[in-house]
Image (cartoon, rainbow, N blue to C red):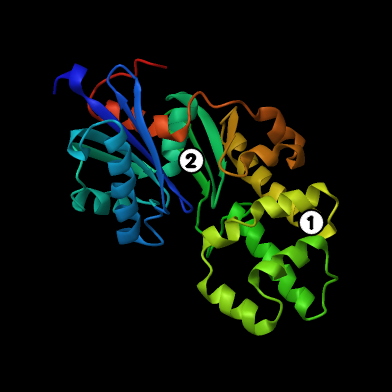
Amino acid sequence: MEQAKAYFLGIDGGGSRCRARIRDAAGRMLGEAIGGSSNIYQDFDGALANIIATAAEAAGRAHLKTSDLHAGLGLAGIVTSVGAERIAEAKLPFASVIADNDAYAAWVGAFAGSDGGIVIAGTGSIGFASINGVRHMVGGWGFALGDHGSGAWLGHHAVRRAALAIDGLLQPTPLIENVLSRVGRNRFDVSRWSEQATPKDYAEMAPLVFECAAKGDVVGMTIVIEGAAAISSLGRALLARGAGKLCLLGGVAKVYPPYLDADVKQALTAPGADALDGAIMMARQAQSIPVSWA
């Protein structure tokens, strides 16, 4: 491969959206795009379709074909090598593909290969660190088993409390009233809504939870405090393994720091680059081309 004509695609695929970025070998950004959910654990075929569509949109803006692109994929839902193997077998329309967990791509971007840990608080939640070349992962079990403190978790707890209010077991608050206006005000409507609800649907309520908490809503404050404790626990687990520094990333990351425990807050540092550039770094490394723009 002629390095000067190499093009690299970074994909950050999460439960709510897929983001794509293309850079050339010199590091110039050529195109970006945003698409739908790309969690391969929740919907493998649907996630791949969204990845391809988002990559094609970014490629169009860069006046390239997807077959021109060496792709680095950071994807929610890759927990073991089995997920990466399925990606490899899918024969995606790229010049080459390297896939890993979205937390790994985010860590690569944040620390560029140096020791450190990240806690992602997006639609889901996960803690990831690499220390002396050894990976450490905490959380990241998905909505059914974990994702404590995540956007989906925050929204889910808000809806659960709204259900309690319908039964007269919890005093309504502005947060609960707002949630009920979205999901329904009786048992039938809320049950029907919950049957169809996805983690993304719950995560869309996370900003509302933080907004109400900031205004003193007791239900919102309780949920945020519980969520912050969960995020602090993920960070503390990585610090105990020797991470030293932590980056807090994801859709609700910016609003969590005031609520975090002091030791975790003190360890926070700004990431060197985002998950998209981390995925591009993965693709470059797979082609033995060093990062030249960082």
Q: Is residue 114 above or below residue 154?
A: above
Q: Residue 80 carries which label?
A: none
Q: Where is residue 216 in the image (x, y as percent from the top left)?
A: 86, 51
Question: Which sits earlier in the primary sequence, circle 1 or circle 2?
Answer: 2
Tell whether 25 sits left or right of 80: left
Dot 1: within a 10 Å radius of its alpha carbon, few (fewer than 14), some, or many (20 or more) residues?
some
Q: What residue type is labelled 2?
A: His
In-front residue for pair 132/164: 164
**Residue that label 2 marks:** 136
Q: Position of residue 120 (x, y in %)?
A: 55, 42
In-front residue for pair 154/240: 154
**Residue that label 1 marks:** 222
| Quarter location, residue 209 | bottom right
Tell whether 292 sits left or right of 109: left
Is the residue under label 2 in contact with that under label 1 (CB below 8 Å)?
no
Residue lying at the far left of the rendered structure? 1
| Quarter location, residue 255 | top right
Q: Residue at x 58, y 32 (%)?
A: 247
* Quadrant of image for the N terminus: top left
Tell whether 65 sits left or right of 292: left
Residue lying at the far bottom of the rendered structure? 188
In-front residue for pair 194/64: 64
Q: Residue at x 76, y 38 (%)?
A: 258
Judging from the image, what secondary structure is the residue with disc 1 in?
helix
The count of marks equals: 2
Circle nearer the viewer, 1 or 2: 1
Q: Is residue 49 above or below residue 70?
A: below
Q: What residue type is labelled 1?
A: Thr
Q: Distance between the residues labelled 1 and 2?
A: 30 Å
Dot 2: within a 10 Å radius of its alpha carbon, few (fewer than 14), some, or many (20 or more) residues?
some
Q: Is residue 245 above or below residue 85?
A: above
Q: Position of residue 31 (x, y in %)?
A: 35, 31
